[in-house]
Image (tube, rainbow, N blue to C red):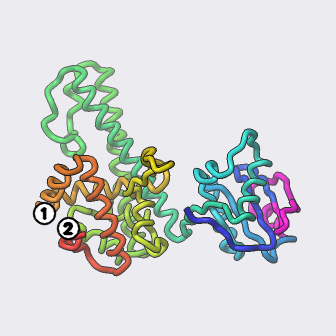
Amino acid sequence: MRFYNKQHKYYCGIDLHARTMYLCIMNQEGDILFHRNRKTNSEAFLKTITPYREDIVVCVECIFTWYWLADLCAKENIPFVLGHALYMKAIHGGKSKNDRIDSRKIAVLLRGGTIPMAYVYPRKMRSTRDLLRRRMFFVHKRAELISHIQNTNSQYNLPQFGKKIAYKTNRIGIEKRFENLSVRKSVEADLAMLKAYDQVIADVELYIIHQVKIHNPNAYHLLKTIPGVGQILALVLLYEIEDVNRFPRFQQFCSYARLIRPTKESAGKRCGVSNKKIGNHHLKWAFSEAVCLLLRESDEVEKRRQKLEQRHGKGKALGILSKKLGIAVYYMLKRGKAFDLSKYLNQ
């Protein structure tokens, strides 16, 4: 956990919403200088902080509306802090909750140097990262349509398709096997949606491939040197990591990617493990997929998995290999070197 502990003359905590924002500005002595509700727009924000612009820091909780404020502060050279929502709740909970109380709590934590920081993803690659996440949403919806067609086929005890209907050429004419007109119409609707999703996903992927050539083509090609990792996994790893240099140590990177299970202890007794919610679940998914593909591509890694499975069990064996891959990716991007299977196995 990282805390913002720089000293400023004024501290601004904002409880930010889509239409309104509650601002609390206090000085170094803890006196509240401004504590009111304002409309969520750039003009109102800049006008409010104008008397304190000489030395002010702004902080908001990490929710979906922070993008515009972070970009505005960067443009106006105003220090901006993004508070980690889950950590903030654990540090400063309370019985009562409203916008006025929340904005004051944010300002108090900021002034006291106890505001837990989340990463402010730079504007340059942020929108492409969000587009890549949106692509994943489309892929999930497409998979639901395919599952519905397969389930409908089983529901009426019809012969199996024989070929994967995920491929467009294998879906030709499958609606004709359903005699009931309503069922056939339902499958036709699924097929029409599948066709649309295929086109949208292909267009999005092509656009992102063009964008990565602008943002960081070298790192993209390095990640593709991992056996089994194709363009989509490489894109996910690249855009979710953004800049590996923001992690001083590989342990911090592995924690962010949810590749470790920190233990909880009290009075010398183990109480369980954590890291289920904190971190980047997109990276966790990407590394889990990459390890499965690496096992398929490399017999040496598969032999190592079998040895680990005998000692630790199947789940933990995959977790160990995922962590090793996370360390390998960390140093690949740090040093600008391609994946080395021998180094991976000898970690």
Q: Is residue 323 above or below residue 124?
A: above
Q: Which mark is residue 223?
A: none
Q: Is residue 256 above or below residue 214?
A: above
Q: Which mark is residue 345?
A: 2
- Write the residue at 24% across / 30% down: 175
Tell whether 263 sits left or right of 309. right
The image quadrant where one finds the N terminus is bottom right
- Sequence-wise, which precedes: disc 2 or disc 1? 1
**x and y percentages locating residue 6 in the rendered image:** 69, 73
Q: Using the rendered image of the protein, determine whether residue 47 is visible from the camera's viewpoint.
A: no
The image quadrant where one finds the C terminus is bottom left
**x and y percentages locating residue 328 in the rendered image:** 30, 70
Q: Nearer the viewer, residue 74 or 139?
A: 74
Q: Nearer the viewer, residue 137 or 28?
A: 28
The kind of residue on which mark 2 rests is Leu
- Alpha carbon distance from label 2 to label 1: 8 Å
Q: Residues within 10 Å of mark 1 (few under 14, many from 20)?
A: few
Which quadrant of the figure has residue 75?
bottom right
Check if residue 41 falls in the magenta segment: yes
Instruction: Check whether the beta carbons of the residues at disc 2 and disc 1 lie within 8 A of each other.
Output: yes
**x and y percentages locating residue 294 in the rendered image:** 21, 60
Q: Residues within 10 Å of mark 2 (few under 14, many from 20)?
A: some
Q: Using the rendered image of the protein, determine whether residue 305 is visible from the camera's viewpoint.
A: yes
- Write the residue at 70% across / 76% down: 77
Q: Nearer the viewer, residue 104 or 20?
A: 104
Instruction: Identify the residue under disc 1.
Output: 300
Tell whether 14 sits left or right of 187. right
Specify the segment rendered in magenta: 25-50
